[in-house]
Amino acid sequence: MQEKYFGHSVLRKEGRAKVTGRARYVDDLAFPDSSLEIIYGATVRSHVPRGRIRDIRYEDGIPWDEFTIVTAADIPGKNQIALIEHDQPCLASEYINHPEEAVVLLAHPDKYLLEDARRAVRIDVEPLPAIFTIEDSLAKREIIWGKDNVLKSYLMEKGDVDSAWALADVIIEGEYRTGAQEQLYIENQGMVAVANLSDGVTVWGSLQCPHYVHKALVPVFGLPAEKVRIIQAETGGGFGGKEEYPSIIAAHAALLAWKSGKRVKILYDRAEDMAATTKRHPSRTRHRTGVTRDGKLVAMDIEFVLDGGAYATLSAVVLSRGTIHASGPYSCPNVRVRSQAVATNAPPHGAFRGFGAPQSIFAIERHMDRIARELNLTPEEFRRRNFIRQGQTTATGQVIHEGVDFDALLDRAFRESDYHAKREQFARENPGSAIKRGIGFASFMHGAGFTGSGEVYLASVVEVEATPEGCIRVLAGSTEIGQGANTIFSQIAADTLGIGYDRIEIAQPDTGAVPNSGPTVASRTSMVVGKLVETAALALKKTLVDSGLLCDQCTEAEFVRACGKYIETRGPLRSRSEYQAPPGLFWNDATYSGDAYGTYAWAVYVAEVAVDTATYEARVTDFVAVQEVGKVINPLLAAGQIEGGVAQAIGMALYENVVWRDGRMANGQMTNYIMPTAADIPPIRVFFEEHPYPFGPGGAKGIGELPMDGPQPAILNAIEHAIGISLNEIPATPEVLMDAFAKAAAGKAGGLG
Amino acid sequence: MRANIPNYDLRVPASLREALALLASEPGTWQPFAGGTDLMVLLEAGKLSHRHFLSVSKLADLRGIEVSADAVAVGALSTYTEIQNHPVLQREFPLLCSAARETGSIATQNRGTLGGNIVNASPAADSPPALLVYDAEIELVSVRGARWQPVHGFHTGYKKMAIAPDELVRRVRLPRRLKPWRQYYRKVGTRKAQAISKVCFAGAALMEGGTILDIRIALGSVAPVVLRVVKTEDRLRGKKLTPEGIAAVKEIFVSEISPIDDIRSTARYRLRVAQNLLEIFLSQISI
Amino acid sequence: MAEPIARVDIACKVNGEQRRAHVYPMARLLDVLREEFHLTGTKEGCGEGECGACAVLMNGVIVNSCLVPAMQANGEEIRTIEGIANGAQLHAVQEAFLECGGAQCGICTPGMVIAAVALLERHSHPSDAEIREGLAGNLCRCTGYQKIFASVVRACEAVAEKSA
């Protein structure tokens, strides 16, 4: 196997189309070979957070006979969006459970008139009492889901926490909260659909998981699987926001297409996308930690709660990942995590990069600094005494077999960021300055791939086929969403077969043409699916070798000739690879213990901040990200992932505040939901360590979500260093900082210094 | 996109005369449309209640920045880009240039106009605090002729102005008097660029020794209109600054502004930060 | 229901070519480009002039096409992403974006390239601060901006190398 491309910054496969504006996103799609008229679809939504639908009225002044109107009654199959539970309807029929819930769909050729029509549909709802907070849901102020509002709960235990308190010299408690966060992909969600009984349903769209959409649409239409086809268009960012939500908009577009007989395009505008689609689950974490005087963790009792919104959707899985990551990369003999996802009357929260881990890691990494302070240890010394090492077990009892070396990662991060010198410099200079500076860090890990037996359950498949000209097509359900999947797969295939990068083609993800390689989520695409690309390519080559047309050691020209010869004489040349779990992994779903992930990426991030005491604005002035990732397949793309994730995490920590009014996002415009601009993001300096993971392609681990986990606590740790005030809730907006300053000053004035 | 586009008319008058005639013939029906950076946002949000617009962007009478001995006359259609790049404005009216530079993005600055900003009458506008400090005057024209109106007092209430339905802003006159004054501008937004202000502070003082001979202070985003805090100014005029003096003037200052809680920030925050900016301004001018 | 306004004829120069359209006067230039002229490279990201994905050059300066009514584009010169390359020869900015990883999902890229081209036309050797200011009107959610900055720096170098 050559290593001509692997490990190199090979140029992005579809890069040229992107820089010339030729890449075709869903709103750019044209269907020149079709005579089918394109009409526009719009969604009429509830304004009320909870209630019973009494009536739907269509006001005068709109030529309703020109419109296609779809309600729940028009659904040919089941009124549900299949995911894990099936509690979410495709269209609300009797009850409303959150603001923005879809009730009526409209379609018309004139998109301007459509907008007037949308406003002319009156949904008369008899309101029911609604709840909007974790506290109210836990207190069962109203029961809005199931018997007790609990969408899912876990109990994860290691050792015996209750007995272990006796071993602790000091017990430290803390509560930490994170708010909702909007994925804010720059391309709004959209779908184009055609649907009829004889041809079935075909949907093109902006999405991450064509097979998820397929799975959801089959029961909606009651059609056989082969009559539903989902095709991914170039997708302008996803970050999890286009993992599960696209099934809803696809179903809506398809229903309008079914009823109208036309090609229907639904494109959300920014306001609709922000208000109606999923966001990151808000969280509340409570820590109770027992440590010895000399800084050893003996007991960790963690309560982790997520606000899931009105329906179950993916909350069970987000909760799972948050639960497993809640105790951090530390060795502690006694750990208990009690976690719950609870329902509120908000649009369901959903997948967003990190998927529960940013929430629970924020808490543990803030808490570790708190404990350090209590023990009069530096944040790093306390951690060094507890970092997990090779041979030790995680909170799920997983033995870490690889040689994880957090001391080395910490040393490198400190060196690159000049941490100690700055720590001392800022402490010295701050008293005389109106701008207070600080530096802080976080140490963390992120498990790559689906949890536990998830990858086995997914049973991902990749196929590879040769063309008569000796080009190779990779057929995978994985989607290029900006992370570089097309490029990575091409590098792997090219090197595996010993041929040129330009000979590799990535087939467009189309459920009618590619196998199900699992969803493009969970930091699994390079590591799990990339490995399948490698094994499929190897299998294809083996077919040629076994046929006598090729030697194992061959040139590109020989390979190309052999492909042509094989196809000419024997027919299609195609191979298939199915997921094989790495040996020795055991996971117990019932006890929530065992090997949670095949591997982890490990990281230490350092954030430098400046706090303006006149305006209470905190900004990040420098950022260092050090991570161990197995093997870097493409340095440019890998750094791009880290930089992008860090920027999103900076947004989550300091800028991105969802303003809620009765379950509805009130600031759903880019003017008022604040994402960092080029003027706000500091230099982000990225460094990789490589200890190859034997079961990833070339040793690579998954890294897509890792950078979303660490910056938030690092930043708040830095702010605490800068201003001496402990903040435990994000986003830490200037208004929050100001209140914290005021409270601290009042505390001092009251003689509590 | 929340608007039914065919419902909106945008006409292009061939001359100022034609524009004014149309405004006069159907008062209240036609609204002037300059760069569109505010109006188009309202349109797309489905919140544009007016339907008939007059594009004034090509009217030569409203363009141009003219420098004379005692004033600079900035045409209503001057864009933020033109303003911040004008050498005399840069030298003598730095607060206005700062405001222009911090408004929106470069793309917004290439289209947004000073006149449009004034008649949009947002309490969070970035340029009007600078205009107030500079004692700017607005020239309003109609079929009945032209009149001058100080910017101070032009905005009478939230989104209310002393302008007749048939009047257009033609020019803004900036007297070239404040060159020797110490000047300070600070906009506090939600992020470093492309931000609507949470507090906007513009101040200028004529100092002699440590004494304030004359002073102007204007703020945005702390009241229903952009305003000059005249009681605060009166309290400071003629005084030498002392810590007790600054503490006392803060109380007056607080009584003159009335910030609110809104989608971007809180009254508490605005009140506190406005005071902090006042303190910074006063400490800077007393050096 | 209000009486709809009549469509009007507009004519403008787009990427060097005379183009005509019969559109509503308040139709957004963005929609005229995409739907009338079939130039789909310019994107809608927010419809409120905040994200810059719709940026084009109008009379040589960067504007957000979602905020320009068709009537005001009449008679003007527009340059979109489709007009940045010179046939098959990419602009130095486009080459640099490829080389330096300035594009990930690509949706912000057309507007970002326009912003970078406009920046380099104003400052041939922009400082770090000038690059940040020049691109602050274009939001990118994927890259964290780092490789976009690097692309601009690379483009300057490439232009300088070429003229050397």
Image (tube, coloured by chain):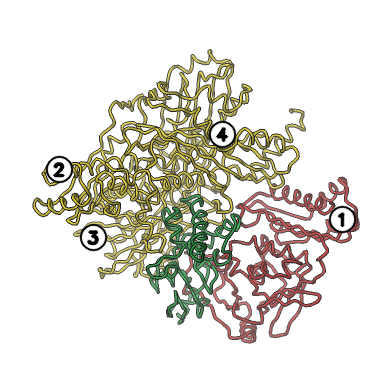
Chain letter of mark 2 equals A
Judged left or right of residue A96, residue C57 is: right
Q: Chain of mark 4?
A: A
The quadrant of the rendering that contains the N terminus of chain A is top left
- Residue A107 at x, y percent in the picture: 36, 64
Q: CA distance from mark 2 to mark 1?
A: 92 Å
Element marked by disc 3 = strand
Mark seen at residue A196: 3
- Disc with the residue nearer the chain's start (4 vs 3): 3
**Are both tags, 2 and 1, on one chain?**
no
Q: Which residue is mark 4?
A: A414
Dot 4 falls on a residue whose secondary structure is helix
| Chain drawn green in the picture | C
Residue in front for this viewpoint, A71 or C123: C123
Q: Which residue is mark 1?
A: B236
Is the C terminus of chain A in the top left, top right, bottom left or bottom right quadrant?
A: top right
Chain drawn yellow in the picture:
A
Q: Is residue B185 left or right of residue A387?
A: right
Which chain is home to disc 3? Answer: A
Q: Is residue A407 above or below residue A610?
A: above
Q: How many marks?
A: 4
